[in-house]
Amino acid sequence: MEVDPTKARGYVISEDDFQFTEALCKLYHLCIGFNQDPLDEDDFKFTYEYDDDFTTFPTICLLAMGCIHMKIFETPGLPALKPQQLLHGEQIVEVFNPIVPGSTIKCVATIEDVADKVKGMLIIVKIDILDPENPEMQYSRCYMNCYVKGYGGFGDKGVLDLRVPSPPIRTPDQTLEISTNEKLASLYRICGDLNPLHMIPSAAKSVGFDKPILHGLCTYGILSRAVYKTYCQEDPTLIKSVSARFCSHVFPGETIKIDLYKEANSVFFSASTKERGLVVCTGVVDLTPLAKI
């Protein structure tokens, strides 16, 4: 089947309700690193339901994406694809309002663009996280940029340019090291991403990995939290957006080395595995002017 971007653009692939139960919120926050220090009471706002400021971290909205990956394959104008052909290349989250633990939201996912990249095609999915009772109340907007090998050459270069900027080439302002638990992928999958690639050794080996890898969106949350703990004075509302490019994978149990670069009201990051020296993710967190960076 030939690619026809005009049929795909604007197609709503999902319009579902999703509940952020208190248990799910706490699990997500623990997975991305909150309460690694059990004596850090500033983290209780994310992990303890009786805290006066109990809330959610901005990147939690990504859990609502659920089975969107699978529904992409039902899009008119796109060929019949297999899940392993879809490479999640970039992720952008724009934050407008905090999601309340225990609340239900509406997730509306739309094919925003399809572009010819010569050796493959780029699919951009826009995900709006809304209040189901008041659609004018928006919590966040996400862009998921996916690359599919072998389907280029159809000539349409697309209508959007959502490239994630690269970190500056200079000495970082700060370098952090964050260790991950060997069981982290097994725990994070309970948040909703049940891809066997992250659990079953044979599934990981079938796509070229020595063993199961950590979810890219878990790494995304870990890096976002690192910027938050360093520059946001324990106030999650100071985060405006998080943009990241996935370069490689993290094995559960590895240590992530994070270089941070301050530029105006933004903090760029470059993350690599300490054990293998492999860059796994780069990107930027945009903060409000109230952040003291």
Image (spheres, helix red, strand yellow):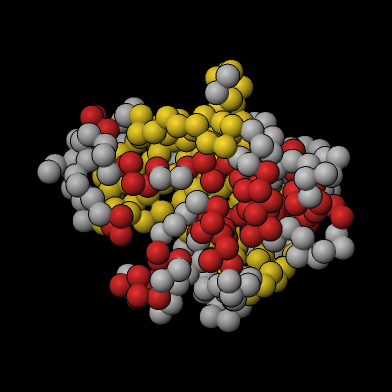
Residue 90 located left or right of residue 242: left
**Which residue corresponds to the image point at 26% horizontal and 37% vertical from the top-left?**
75
Residue 288 showing in the rendered view: yes
Of 121 and 195, nearer the camera is 195
Question: Quick check: 30 above or below 165?
Answer: below
Residue 40 located left or right of residue 47: right
Q: Position of residue 245 (x, y in %)?
A: 49, 55
Q: Position of residue 113 (x, y in %)?
A: 34, 36
Q: How many marks?
A: 0
**Which residue corresponds to the image point at 52% horizontal and 36% vertical from the top-left?**
18
Residue 40 in which image quadrant: bottom right
Q: Position of residue 205 (x, y in %)?
A: 35, 75
Residue 124 in which image quadrant: top left
Question: Quick check: 221 above or below 139?
Answer: below
**Which residue corresponds to the image point at 44% horizontal and 57% vertical from the top-left?**
194
Of 105 and 137, nearer the camera is 105
Q: Position of residue 237 (x, y in %)?
A: 74, 38
Residue 128 showing in the rendered view: no
Image quadrant occupied by the N terminus: top left
Residue 128 located left or right of residue 228: left
**Which residue corresponds to the image point at 84% horizontal and 48% vertical from the top-left?**
233
